[in-house]
Every structure is written in C-alpha cells, then in structure tokens.
Image (cartoon, rainbow, N blue to C red):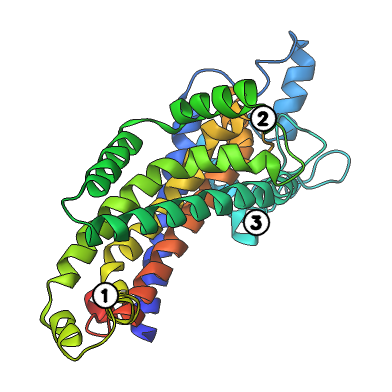
Amino acid sequence: MIGFLARRALWFVVTLLAVVTVSFFLMRSVRGGPFDADRNLHPVIEKNLKARYHLDWPLWKQYLQYIGPLNLDEKGLVDGDGSKPWAGILTGDFGPSFKYRDFTVNDIIGQSLPISMALGSVAMFWALLLGLTTGVLSALLRGGKLDVSMRLAATAGIALPNFVIAGFLVIGFVFWLELLPVAGWGSLRHLILPGFALGAPFAAYISRLTRTGMLEVLSQEYIRTAHAKGLRPRTVLLRHAIKGGILPVVSYLGPATAGILTGSLVIEKIFAIPGTGTHFVNSALNRDYTLAMGVTILYTVLVYSLNTIVDLAYTFLDPRIELEEA
C-alpha cells in the first residue's frame, strides 16, 4: 500500500503541474482581461492596476510568480502600500481576486466550498438511494414489468441533462404544488430540488451498474451454494450478493463525485446557490484569472483524491484485487 500511495503522490504532483500550466496559459491566451468589464478606465489607472497585480510582466514571469514564492523584482513582489499580492500556490495562497478586490481567492473558496459540498452530499444521497434501490430490485425481478419500467426510467435519466430535469422539478414542485422554494440558500428545503436534479442522472447510471453487477453475482457458484445450504434469501442478498454486486458502483463513485462537483456549476446558477460553481462561472465571464485558477486546482485535487480513495475501497470489498495492479 505504501508503494501504491507513493506512486499516486508522485503522479499527483505531475498532474497538478500539468493542469496549472495548461490552464494558466490558456486563460491568458483568450482576448480580454480582468479589467475590461469595468467602466472605461483612465489609461494611468489601468496601468497602475496591471502593475499592482503584475499583469504587465511577461507571461513566463507571471507563471513563475504564480507557482511559488520567488523574488522576481527589486521590490520583492511588494506593492507600494507594503502588501504582498500573493505568495504562490506552493504555499497554498491562490492570490487576490481581480473582481472581488476585497477578498482573496482563499476567502471566496472558504465561504463557497461548504455550500457546494452540502449540495453535492444531497445529490450523492439521492443518487445512491435511488440507484442502488432500483438496481437491486431490477436484478431480483429480472424480466418483470417493474424491471422494464426501472430500466426505461434509468435510460431517460441518462438521456436528460440535469438542467432539463431541474426545469421539470421547478414547474412541478414550485409552480403547481407550491411545496418547495424555487431558489436561494438558507435551509435544507433549498437543497432538495437542486440536489435531486444534480443527482438524478448519476442515479440512473448507478441503477444500471447495480443491476448488471447483481445479475453477474447472483449467477455465481457461491450464491447457489448459499441457497443450497438453506440460508434465507434476505441473508444471501445482504451478506453475500450485495458486496460483490456493488463493485462496479464503487468504481463509478470517483468519476461520479467529480461529475457532481463539476455539474453543480449549472445547477447552482439555475437555483441561485452561492457555491463554488457559481464563482467558477463568474470567474470565466469576468476573466478573473486567479479565481478561475483556484477553483480549477481545487477540482483537480478533489477528483484525484476521490479516485485514490475509490481504489483503496475496492481492495476492502474484494481482497483479490491488489493495489499494485490497480
């Protein structure tokens, strides 16, 4: 396990460096800048703003400054008021936001990430509850009307984007039944609709994977042996079949969690939830380089970490799988 984690840590550094490098130069290759959305600034004011954030430097110099705490000029990266714009991502400092100038990127992520995590938790709850339940029932009732209905519902869930599902939910539960709030943030009721809309497509995938895994496991010799020994069907299902049947789901949870985090960008905008996804969209529109980079790095770290956790969980569910071969 130590060798596996060491290799993963090495590849994490390589992956993060590649993501940072590509994102940095791609964002600065797009026309426009962080101050273009403001009122027409006086040339002197615009020049001073670019100098404050070192946007007047060559790209390679900006890149080196963003990576780590380097003394690249005579002032030691200190502004005229004695403040330091940022120390570099190697120190965990993502720098100041170009749009929200009273906040740093760390402040914005610290305020918005718990909201996105709460939304993602509700979405994952819906996805696992609906996906595992319907998948197991569909496998146990293979070929029946309920099985066909659940497979049709799963196909529809995969085909429909989450923002289309969100529209149907708003029409049904807000305008017709008037049971839930349409948007905003403040209580669990505000998370029910966006959480379901975000988790529904993933519930459909989990349902299909669970059904396939369960059908394969139920046909194994050890399941037939358990039945032959006189064990109750419920015991065979819960103690023997479920553990092997959900292995495909466990493999999918890493990409699914990453998809929920990135998919929340649209859902957060639709339901006016002040999460990290909303700031990510706004940072792209506002050319807020540091905020966009900060959220991109955050998503990269989360995706890589979650996939590593999934690989570790796989070995606990099936001891035959070795980490070195993962």
Q: Which mark is residue 148?
A: none
Q: Residue at x 78, y 47 (%)?
A: 84
Q: Residue at x 38, y 58 (%)?
A: 133
Q: Is residue 138 visible?
A: yes
Q: Which residue is mark 2?
A: 272
Three-letter amino acid code at the position of disc 2: Ala
Q: Are marks 2 and 3 in contact (CB under 8 Å)?
A: no
Three-letter amino acid code at the position of disc 1: Ala
Q: Position of residue 118 (x, y in %)?
A: 63, 51
Q: Is residue 289 visible?
A: no
Q: Position of residue 1 (x, y in %)?
A: 36, 85
User: In terms of sequence position, does the residue under pointer 2 or pointer 1 come before the other?
Assistant: 1
Residue found at the very far bottom of the displayed protein: 229
Q: CA–CA distance between discs 1 and 3?
A: 54 Å
Q: Which residue is mark 1?
A: 241
Three-letter amino acid code at the position of disc 3: Pro
Q: Position of residue 17 (x, y in %)?
A: 44, 54
Q: Which residue is mark 3?
A: 69
